[in-house]
Amino acid sequence: MDNLTHSIIGLAAGELIDRSLPEEPSRERAHARHRLLLVTGALASNFPDIDLVLMPFLSRPLGYLLEHRGHTHTLLFAIPEALLLVALLWLLWPAARQVLRVSHAARRGVALAAGIGLLLHLGMDYLNSYGLHPFAPVDPHWLYGDTLFIIEPMFWVLLGVPMILQIQRRGMRIVLLGAMALVLTGCTAAGFLQWRALLLLGATALVLGALAGRWRHALVAGTVLSLAWIGVQAGASHAARAEVATDLARQDSASRLLDAAMAPFPANPLCWSFVTVESNTARGTYRLRRGVLSLNETLAPTASCPLKMAGGVAPAGTQGIAWFGSMESSLAQLQHLQQTNCHVDAWLRFARMPLIDAESATDLRFGNLGGANFSTIDYAARAGTPCPAWLPHWGQPRADLLRAP
């Protein structure tokens, strides 16, 4: 997830933890503990992204692809990360050190906020199509939730609005709520949100605003609705994947669907973009396809989905699934490249949807057919250069294509 969403979720966790603990004997200590738990929750919910400092150890794009969501995004590293975060708070924040010395509740709250914040980061990152490998090194395989878009404004509203409503300064509340409304409206005007999605977000904010007099209830309601939203998206992802599989089987029964990377549009459980990978062992080929579908043509026709984000335009009269093109390549060529080119072999430890041509390789999850993106590696230009060293041993997402028949 994006770091704004991580921060909002961490702040909400810190707030809920603070309210669940026994009260402090003085207002000053209560205020200090409250600030400490908010900061701890927000930092912990972002802390695994410190793996970005490891990027320079590998050349682009391998540094980002293999180091981000790497070691610090595993359960093994959660405990040392929590200890490091608490140690930094103790050393660098005198007010935090003071309240931690005298308050058992504060110490318990910090431990909870740090641990829960780290686990929330891993959980939220799992829920999108980028994935992570939380059980490494025991199990280095990538896991993909395919449930949420990587930037999900629904959490900004469900958790951010209640947190804003508790701010005592009225002017600050107005500024923050106005900024949120402006950003969401701008995203809709730019084509990244459906107008229906904007109306849903606005209605949700109004419901939470009705609880403004009892903002604790608003935050609890926002938390419950956040969990419900994840459940709705998970069910919609399963239904969308089933529709894609059915349509592909109708088009080509000889090909076998290996994987479908599903990504919903923001605040929209009906519109989904996807990339599929199929294999045809009889022809010795594999095929990638990209498309968009709607789960309900009445409420949200496919042509009305924010197709700009999916890099395509639905043909006139499209119903259900809009296909934006396909690419078929040789399995033998892919396997030969993996075996003979160490740069491609390293890149295949990340690539879930490998689009390979004569000079470069691209993960189609993050771009369009024929276009480059942050995952693109120009392997031809690296001919004769040393192989990348210190590679993390993540499982190859497309090991099913790399095995010889």
Image (cartoon, grey):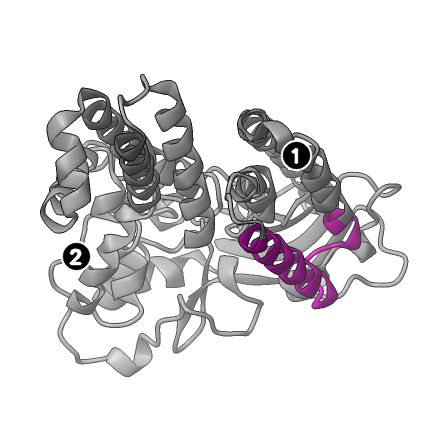
Question: What number of labels is visible?
Answer: 2
Is residue 74 part of the magenta span, yes or no? Answer: no
Viewed as shown, does residue 280 lie left or right of 131? right
Percent x, y of residue 229: 61, 32
Q: Camera-side residue: 265 or 367? A: 265
Q: How would you rate the neighbour count of disc 2 (Cα within 10 Å): few for under 14, some for 14-19, many for 20 or more?
A: some
Q: Is residue 121 visible?
A: yes
Q: How would you rate the neighbour count of disc 1 (Cα within 10 Å): few for under 14, some for 14-19, many for 20 or more?
A: many
The secondary element bearing badge 1 is classed as helix
Q: Residue at x 18, y 21 (%)?
A: 104
Mark 1: amino acid: Leu
Given this view, does label 2 or label 1 mark the residue nearer the observer?
A: 1
Is residue 174 part of the magenta span, yes or no? Answer: yes
Instruction: Tell me which segment is drawn in magenta.
Output: 171-198
Tell me, for residue 301, which label it has, or none. none
Quarter of the figure with residue 179: bottom right
Q: Is residue 137 visible?
A: no
Q: Which residue is mark 2?
A: 391
Mark 2: amino acid: Leu
Viewed as shown, does residue 277 lie left or right of 73? right
Percent x, y of residue 250: 73, 41
Percent x, y of residue 60: 28, 72
Q: Residue at x 85, y 55 (%)?
A: 318
Q: Camera-side residue: 286 or 212? A: 212
Q: Residue at x 31, y 64 (%)?
A: 337
Q: Are marks 2 and 1 in contact (CB under 8 Å)?
A: no
Q: Which residue is mark 1?
A: 208
Q: Residue at x 39, y 63 (%)?
A: 333
On screen, residue 324 above or below 124: below
